[in-house]
Amino acid sequence: MKFADPFWLMDLLKGEEYFTKEELAMYDGTRKKELYLSVLGKVYDVSKGRQYYGPGESYHGFVGKDASKAFVTGDFSTGGLSDDVNTLHSSELEGLLHWVELYEKNYPYRGKLIGRFYKSNGSPTKYLEKIHERLAEGKQSEEIQKDLERRFPPCNLEWSAEKGKIVWCSNKSGGITRDWVGVPRKFFLNSGREFRCACIQPGSDVKHEYGYFVEYMDCPPDSDKCYLRYDED
């Protein structure tokens, strides 16, 4: 997949500097009065937020370095203030992009930090390309899940001491309004043995590219309601 940085055009239009880690460390509000920080290798001037980022303030740990990982983990220890985001989940990486957007909107952009994310000529490293590939894959997976919920809406669920657990379908079950009701089925995803209750239209193929459907035991296949056995929870 070809690397795509959503802010590359803005960077070109603004002009930019390239910082080494040692140079960026100077902008900590003590050695130089300006306050610079880096997120995913992008350097921003947060001097106007001195009440938050200045020496002794809550977010000063982010200043003079790239501590991207801590933006989403909340770990402000020496080890936690790291730019290694490889262990973060896709949703956490998405959260980092929101931070980049926040700084783009509210603080002056100064350039790029040479190192993990950018080479000395300002081009992205393989590491950053992999991060963006993961973001794209995560977004695609999220879109697939939304499509599956739309096509096979979750069942309604009820439990009582008298009847036990009941799953049933309606034309609004799962919060998906539609012109059909459907029948409950176990929807097993190909990724494992876990399943969820899904409402499918009678006659639908029991096979699907992302999983397969199984009828609930002792439940008529054309019924829109099933009373579950304890071993089917």
Image: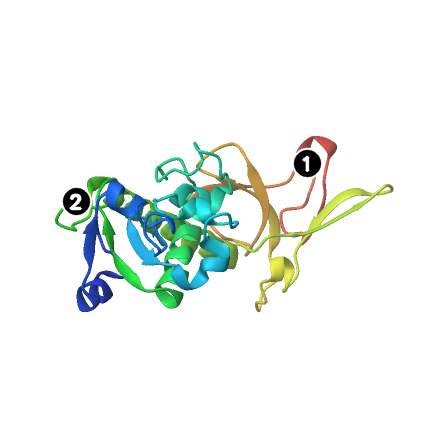
Q: Nearer the viewer, residue 210 or 80?
A: 80
Can you say whether 72 is above or below 232 in the image? below
What's the amino acid at mark 1?
Asp
Q: From mark 2 to mark 1, how far is it between C-alphas? A: 53 Å
Where residue 88 sits: x, y (%)? 42, 39
Q: Which numbered tag is attached to residue 233?
A: 1
Q: Secondary structure at mark 1?
A: loop
Q: Nearer the viewer, residue 118 or 93?
A: 118
> Which image quarter holds the C terminus?
top right
Q: Nearer the viewer, residue 18 or 135?
A: 18
Can you say whether 184 is above or below 172 in the image? above
What's the amino acid at mark 2?
Lys
Observer able to see residue 6: no
Which residue is under mark 2? 119
Observer able to see residue 126: yes
At a point 49% along the width and 56% down the height, the residue shown is 52
At a point 19% along the width and 69% down the height, the residue shown is 13
Q: Secondary structure at mark 2?
A: loop
Q: Nearer the viewer, residue 31 or 169?
A: 31
| Quadrant of the rendered image containing residue 114 | top left
